[in-house]
Amino acid sequence: MTEDDVTRLRELCLALPEVAEGTNHHGEPAWRVRRRTLAQISERHPADRQSFWVPAPAGAKEAMVAAEPDRFFSPPYGGRHWVGVYLDVPVDWDEVRELVVDAYRLIAPGELVARLTEP
């Protein structure tokens, strides 16, 4: 994972209302909305791969992993609807933005979601 990958993910997350940066339990970057985790970097799981994880709508993870297992995976932590996205393969940053915004819509309080400018 390059510092550019972290910077790009950071910019996407912090552009959303009330998102704050911190770290996960392993000291890796993580972004939260109030007390709920929006996204987190992982350099530990899966082993020897760089990735980030976000919550996804029910059924979305399974569909993404089945369609593109070289880009998506089921993370060992985070919850049953979380999806992992590999960062050590070519990354579609427009798609990453959509995943982050969708995750935000799932976990953020309604009054914050209402502040988003996109439909």
Image (cartoon, rainbow, N blue to C red):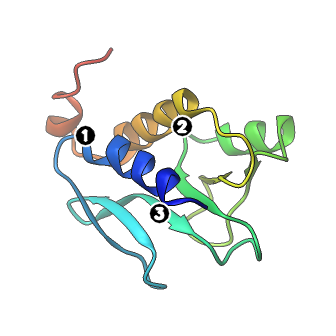
- Residue 84 quadrant: bottom right
Q: Which mark is residue 40?
A: 3
Q: Is residue 33 left or right of residue 77?
A: left
- Residue 22 quadrant: bottom left
| Marks 3 and 1, the one that precedes in the sequence | 1
Q: Residue at x 56, y 57 (%)?
A: 53
| Marks 2 and 3, the one that precedes in the sequence | 3
Label 3, secondary structure: give it.
strand
Residue 94 in picture, x, y percent from top left: 53, 27
Q: Is residue 9 left or right of residue 46?
A: left
Residue, disc 1: 16
Calculate the distance from the C-alpha at mark 3 to the C-alpha at mark 1.
Answer: 15 Å
Label 2, secondary structure: give it.
helix
Q: Amino acid at mark 3?
A: Gln
Q: Which mark is residue 96?
A: 2
Q: Residue at x 25, y 39 (%)?
A: 15
